[in-house]
Image: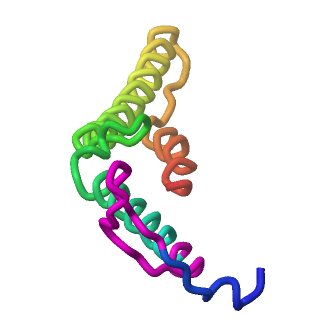
Amino acid sequence: MGKKKLIKVYRLNVEEDETGRRVRSYRVSRLGIALSLLTTFIVVLGGLYALIALTPLRTTIPGYPDPHFRREAVANAIKIDSLESAITRWKLYSENLSRVLAGDTTINLDSLLLAREAPDSLSR
């Protein structure tokens, strides 16, 4: 398509079917129609984006977490971490208790706890 075809002006008449009377008359070019369609498309996409991103409608999207659930997930992760630490301490305590009951030497629990927790603290 050449530049002249894009800017060439056409007349679009809207007429009544029965009487043939002209209702409206528009002067359009191919470039004007293309720009109008592009502008309409961008406005519709922007409106849909604003509707979804700026309203609570976004929580209906699968996989998009609700802020309440996000806070709960963080709180649960912290609880799991502290429970894992407690389980480790109980395992060391029971192992040390069984060594004491068997008459073996005891284990220094503080050094073991520090050794087991050190790799976790470096990865955070």
Q: In which quadrant will I find the N terminus?
A: bottom right
In the image, taking residue 81 as reference, residue 9 lies left or right, namely right
Query: Which residue is at 32% across, 54% downward?
Result: 19
Using the image, determine if residue 73 lies above or below residue 58. Answer: above
| Residue 7 found in image quarter | bottom right
Q: Quadrant of residue 8?
A: bottom right
Q: Is residue 13 magenta?
A: yes
Residue 83, given in percent of the width and then of the height, sits at 35, 29
Q: Determine whether, in the image, residue 24 is placed left or right of residue 41.
A: left
Q: Does 17 lie within the magenta span?
A: yes
Determine the residue positioned at 32% across, 63% down. 21
Q: Nearer the viewer, residue 56 or 118?
A: 56
Question: In terms of depth relative to the viewer, which is nearer, 123 or 1?
Answer: 1
Q: Position of residue 108 (x, y in %)?
A: 47, 36
| Up-down relation of residue 122 to residue 114 (above or below) | below
Quarter location, residue 3 = bottom right
Image position, residue 122 (x, y; %): 54, 57
Q: Nearer the viewer, residue 48 or 75?
A: 48
> Which region shows up in magenta?
12-34
Task: Name the foreground residue: 118 vs 83.
Answer: 83
Q: Residue at x 49, y 18 (%)?
A: 95
